[in-house]
Amino acid sequence: MNSELKRICKTLRLAYVADIVDTIPFENPEQYLESLLHRELQLREEAKAERLIKKARFLSKKTLFQWSEQVRFPPHIDAKELCELHFINQHENVILTGSPGTGKTLLATGLGRKACQNGYEVRFYRVSDLVDTLERVWKEGKLQQFRNKFKKVDLIILDEMGYIPFSKDGAELLFQLISDWYEQKSLIITSNLEFSQWNRIFVDSRLTAALVDRVIHHAHILSFTGDSYRVTHALSRQK
């Protein structure tokens, strides 16, 4: 490999040109240069998407799945429009509710990974883990530092809201954080509870009402019905 070419590419911050210069078909100088630079941009975008996916800390590597009849959409949005991710630019939320095992986390993760591929900053949290973290940083006097970490984040996925009840402090800290994000960020929330049942996890009825009000304002609510995919798959394997 030409060391001078590598030096020039490094100076110009062309991360990939030196490695792909021999892989681009040549028809004429203009076509070659355009194809070379186009490939450089493509590789940059792919690398950026991988960095964003790594920072998001998804628990699964699965991408968007084929839509099932178990998913019920509200009248104003369909699968195609949801996957176009316009809700992120508009700081709208997506709420996925239904029984365990019906595909809520799978869809949330798929939308999150696609958002990363489109250049959005995403963070994925199990809600119980997030509350544990909030209580810890609060006790350490680092709560504001933690809240500041979300300044450049576009989409936050809160998975499994309702599986584990919170302490009073944990519920209030989560409420503060979601209030920070209200009309500033987009949320995807998965829950096996209807909104009327959120009192079970937040204890304080006034706090619960205020939280639900913020969450469902500007929200697309999708319902998941039917049997658990995991149970169905396990039963089919037994047969």
Image (cartoon, rainbow, N blue to C red):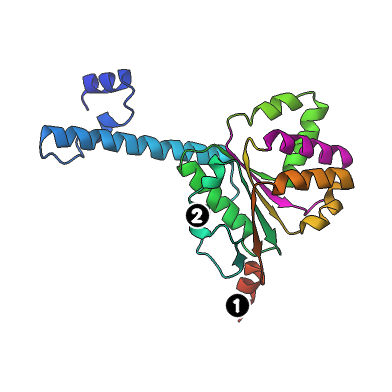
In magenta stretch: residue 166: yes
| Residue 235 falls in image quadrant | bottom right
Above or below for 191 versus 230: above
Residue found at x 50% / y 64%: 66
Q: Residues within 10 Å of mark 2 (few under 14, many from 20)?
A: few
CA separation, marks 2 and 1? 33 Å
Question: Residue 32 vs residue 203: left or right?
Answer: left
Q: Position of residue 175 (x, y in %)?
A: 78, 39
Residue 2 in the image: x percent, y percent? 20, 24
Frontmost residue, 205 versus 7: 205
Q: Is residue 126 above or below residue 80?
A: above
Which of 64 and 96 lies nearest the eye of the viewer? 96
Magenta range is: 153-182
Q: Is residue 170 visible?
A: yes
**What residue is shown at x 27% (from left), y 36% (from top)?**
38
Report which quarter residue 155 is drawn in.
Answer: top right
Taking the magenta stretch, the answer to whether it contains residue 157 is yes
Label 2 vs 1, first from the N-terminus? 2
Q: Position of residue 202 (x, y in %)?
A: 84, 47
Please, what is the three-letter code of the amino acid marked with disc 1? Answer: Ser
What residue is shown with label 2? Answer: 81
Q: Quadrant of the N terminus?
A: top left
- Residue 236 - label: 1
Q: Residues within 10 Å of mark 1 (few under 14, many from 20)?
A: few
